[in-house]
Amino acid sequence: MRTIQRTSSMIAGVSIRRTLVLFVAAILLAPCALAASVRSGSHKQKEDLPELSMSAPISSFKVKIELYYMPQCPGCRQLISTSISEAFQTAGFSDMADVEFKPWGFHHREDGHPVGRIFDNVLESCALQTIGNQHQDLQFMYIECIDRTGTFETNPSNVDRSCAKVIGLTNAQTKQIEECAISPEGKAIAEKYLREGENMEMAYAPWIVVNGHHSKEQEDQVWNSLFHYVCEMYSGPYRSKECHNYDEDLIAEQL
C-alpha cells in the first residue's frame, strides 16, 4: 500500500484512476491466470509422459500363453516337466504370464461326432475349470501330477482323485470334476478345444500360442525356457526380480 500511496502522490487525475483500475484487475485476474497455467501444465505433462497406473490389474499386462496338450503324450510331458515346471517354480512368473492349459487330442470325426480316446481330455478340462484360471499355479500342479502318473490311460478316474487330493481339492470339488466329466458340459468343453485346434490347423501337440499367435520361433523359445521368454516379452510394471539375473547372464554371454 505504501508503494501505491507514493505512486498516487506523483500521478494525478485520470492517471490515478487508470493505475488503480489496472491494479485491481491484475489482482482479480491473477488466480484465473494461475489456474489456467496449472491446467495447461498438467495437460502438457500428461501428453509428454506416458501414464502407467500401478493400480491397474496385473492381468492387463500379462503375456498370454495358451498350451494345447495331450494328457500324458511324451512330448507334452517333456515340455511340462522341464520348461513350464521351471517357470512356475520361479518367483514372480505368474505375475507376468497368464497360462491357459487346454487338453486336446487327435480324433477323427464320423457324422459330426468325435471318435477315439476323449474321456481323459474331458476329465482334465473339467478339473481345470473347477480349479479356475485364476489359480493357474494350482492348475499346473494338477497337470504335473497327472503327467507323473503312468496309469492315467488305463484308469483316469483314480488318478484324478489321487491328484485332486495331492493339490488339496476337497471331496466336493473332486465330485464336481467327476460329475462334469460325464455330463454334456464336460464334453462341450473338450469339443471346444478340438474345434479351436482344427481352426488353427494344429498338426501336433504340444501346440503353443502366445498372445493369440503361433510360430515355430516362439515355440522354440518356449521349449528352451518359458520363463526367460516371458521376461523378454513382458513390458509391465510387475516384472519378476529373477528376470534381472537372466539379463545379467545375457550381457555376460555377449562380452
Image (spheres, rainbow, N blue to C red):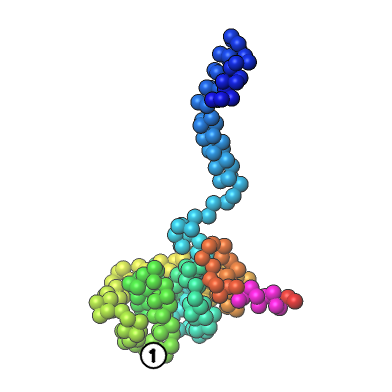
Residue beneath disc 1 = 151
- Where's residue 54, x and y in %? 48, 58
- Where's residue 253, x and y in %? 71, 78
- With respect to residue 44, does 125 lie above or below? below
Quadrant in which the N terminus appears: top right
- With respect to residue 51, does 99 lie above or below? below
Q: Specify the farthest residue to the bottom.
A: 150
Q: Residue at x 64, y 73 (%)?
A: 247
Q: Residue at x 56, y 25 (%)?
A: 2
Quadrant in which the C terminus appears: bottom right
Residue 231 placement, left or right of 141: right
- Where's residue 229, x and y in %? 58, 72
Residue 157 visible within the image: no
**Residue 16 falls in which quadrant of the image?**
top right
Residue 45 visible within the image: yes
Residue 123 placement, left or right of 25: left
Q: Residue at x 35, y 73 (%)?
A: 131
- With respect to residue 195, does 9 lie above or below? above
- Where's residue 235, x and y in %? 57, 62
Residue 173 placement, left or right of 206: left
- The span shown in magenta is 245-253
